Amino acid sequence: MMQTIQNLEEVAMTTDQLSNQLSNQFPNQLPSAPYGTFAPEGGRTIKKPLTLNQLLQMHTKGEKITMLTAYDATFAALADAAGVHCLLVGDSLGMVSQGLPSTLAVSLETMCYHVESVCRGLARVQGSAWLIADLPFGSYQESKEQAVRSAVALLKAGANMVKLEGGGWTVEVVSFLVERGIPVCAHLGLTPQTINALGGYKVQGRGEAGAKLRADAVALEKAGASMLVLEMVPADLAHQITQDLMACPTIGIGAGNATSGQVLVMHDMLGANINKNPKFVRNFLVDSSGIQQAFKLYVQEVQSGKFPDNKLHAW
């Protein structure tokens, strides 16, 4: 019995020594916690979450805003550590995570689940990224009141802002949400939720259609949209829309390099696409030593203006 107690004391001493050694090597982390969870104290400088005002100030100063999609805790934490400003929990998860043929079948419940997962990942590493969540198809088309209920669910799950697709009738919805304190990101150009009406994944806004996109963008900003995604529109048109807007930053995806920032689907920019990557995508993992380095390279090249290259990634 005495020998057993002595053995336990030796094990405890060894454990304490190991803990102290790890604490000296990694003073800002909890040795017993997985996933690099940071201790509440220990001298680490805690990053403050980005605010919408800070993002708008970046736009005013001409600093490029970086955005990637994220659907789970781990990749959200890695992207945040790499300096990505905004994470978008996109309904693209229906295609890249669920294997669906489009985004149309993604439910609000599914979106909330993934927002919660991403939010936990950011919380565990004291992340600072601004978190945007898509309002999925069918969650805001019925009425303004339905849009508020759906947006509230996403914000309660941890989102900072909601995104919806289209112009025209959505202007009234955007105004209704903003008046109730809900930040909104609009989305024009290729809008995947209306892919059946658009006739496929193709460039939008060519010719006379460009004037309507420009008018829609201005109307959405006047309604209170604080950010605008432009997807698969000609680079010149995206440039014009960016200049048309007074304060609302534009985030391009297949819209050239004159927008206020860029967004890509995370799986695409890591080369993890089941199908062929679209023209506007670059595989950043090819030139990197690992995933986090690929995220850092993406941030660097967006902010320096190297990506996208209009000759390679735009129309």
Image (spheres, rainbow, N blue to C red):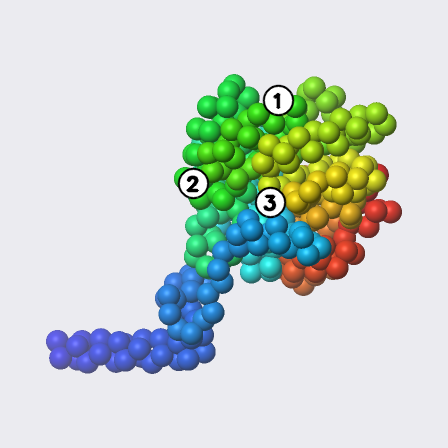
Query: Along the horizontal axis of the image, is 176 left or right of 273?
Result: left
Q: Earlier in the sequence, mark 1 or mark 2?
A: 2
- Eyeballing the image, is 137 above or below 117? above
- Eyeballing the image, is 120 above or below 112? below
Q: CA distance from mark 3 to mark 2?
A: 17 Å
Q: Amino acid at mark 1?
A: Trp
Disc 3 is placed on an element classified as strand
Q: Earlier in the sequence, mark 3 or mark 1?
A: 3
Residue 193 drawn at (x, y percent): 63, 26
Determine crowd level at label 3: few under 14, some 14-19, many 20+ residues with C-alpha closer than 10 A.
many
Q: Amino acid at mark 2?
A: Ala
Q: Which residue was labeled with disc 2?
A: 157
Residue 204 drawn at (x, y percent): 77, 30
Residue 49 drawn at (x, y percent): 49, 56
Q: Which residue was labeled with disc 1?
A: 169
Determine crowd level at label 2: few under 14, some 14-19, many 20+ residues with C-alpha closer than 10 A.
many
Q: Which residue was labeled with disc 3?
A: 69
Name the image quarter holding the C terminus: top right
- Eyeballing the image, is 246 above or below 98? below
Q: Nearer the viewer, residue 242 or 94?
A: 242
